[in-house]
Image (cartoon, helix red, strand yellow):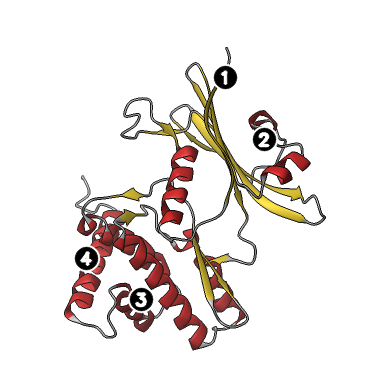
Amino acid sequence: MTARRGCDFVGSDWKAVLAHNGLGDFEALWHLEAVEVDARNCHRGGWSAVSRWELALPNGGVARVYIKRQQNFRTRSLRHPLAGDPTALREFRQMEFLRRRGIPCPETVYCAVRRRGREHRAVLVTEELDGFADLEELAARWVRDGKAPPGVRRRVVDAVAELIGKLHAHRIRHGCLYPKHLFARIGADGRVELRLIDLEKSGWRPLRALFVVHDLAALCQHAMKAWSRSERLRFLCGYLGRKRATPPVRRLWRRIDARLARRRQRRLPATGPRAS
């Protein structure tokens, strides 16, 4: 059966690079023999796999990219409430949506979808975040090598607070806001750059109050291993644009704590009298 073309996108700076590597079309990328960096994510008869690859640059040097390939790995949407959209296509759309609003995320190299009958295939290629480390890795490095200077830690906390505040100000819910999905690069001058990844579940929501605690609790739950109480408070103040712990900051802290307490309670093993 003839394949039907779907979304086709090639970054303006990448078309010649892909062609130089013999990867200028969907089929070449789909059949590329590349080692997968993690176990495949399999769900409802479909799968999603990610590989890391080096592209030779026409003028010398290399560029590293991540290639996400999916087959029948879909999520329902308003456009396709029954059949669903490939999640890679949804992620591509979300990255473009965020970029237009000044939210930094990885650069898209290529995105395309093909459909053969009931089979959906998708390829999404993004540039590797060179010199960046996710917040989880960064915290582990600080613990292993000794605490980073307080000024560096404060700048990271402030940058994360500003970014998530901006994300939520646009009424965009991340949906999976863990430290490993936030990447930071600290320049020689101390400037902090951030990138958001794993945007498949993100999306615009009309009511900010319904998702803020969900996102922030996910971040705080895992950040607690590395952030001190004062750093978490500093984050919430920065997120709300306050210079000190005002009543709105304290209310938000309590709401996050309550959500985390409920999560911990659900994880406790059921206890009760043993049957005799």
Rendered image: mark on residue 235: 3
Residue 134 vertical position relative to residue 11 in the rendered view, above or below: below
Residue 4 vertical position relative to residue 205 in the rendered view, above or below: above
Q: Earlier in the sequence, mark 1 or mark 2?
A: 1
Say if mark 3 contacts mark 1, CB within 8 Å.
Answer: no
Instruction: Farthest residue to the front: give it.
Output: 12
Which dot, 2 or 3, sits closer to the camera? 2
Q: Secondary structure at mark 3?
A: helix
- Residue 101 relative to residue 38: left or right: left
Say if mark 2 contacts mark 4, CB within 8 Å.
Answer: no
On the image, the x and y values in percent for residue 133 come to 58, 66
Question: Who's the residue at 81% across and 54% down the image?
Answer: 59
Q: Earlier in the sequence, mark 2 or mark 3?
A: 2
Say if mark 4 contacts mark 1, CB within 8 Å.
Answer: no
Give the labeled residue for mark 1.
3
Rendered image: mark on residue 258: 4
Question: Who's the residue at 41% across and 77% down the image?
Answer: 158
Q: Residues within 10 Å of mark 2 (few under 14, many from 20)?
A: many
Amino acid type, callout 2: Leu
Quadrant of the frame with the C terminus: top left
Specify the quadrant of the image occupied by residue 75.
Answer: top left
Question: Who's the residue at 27% across and 50% down the image?
Answer: 205
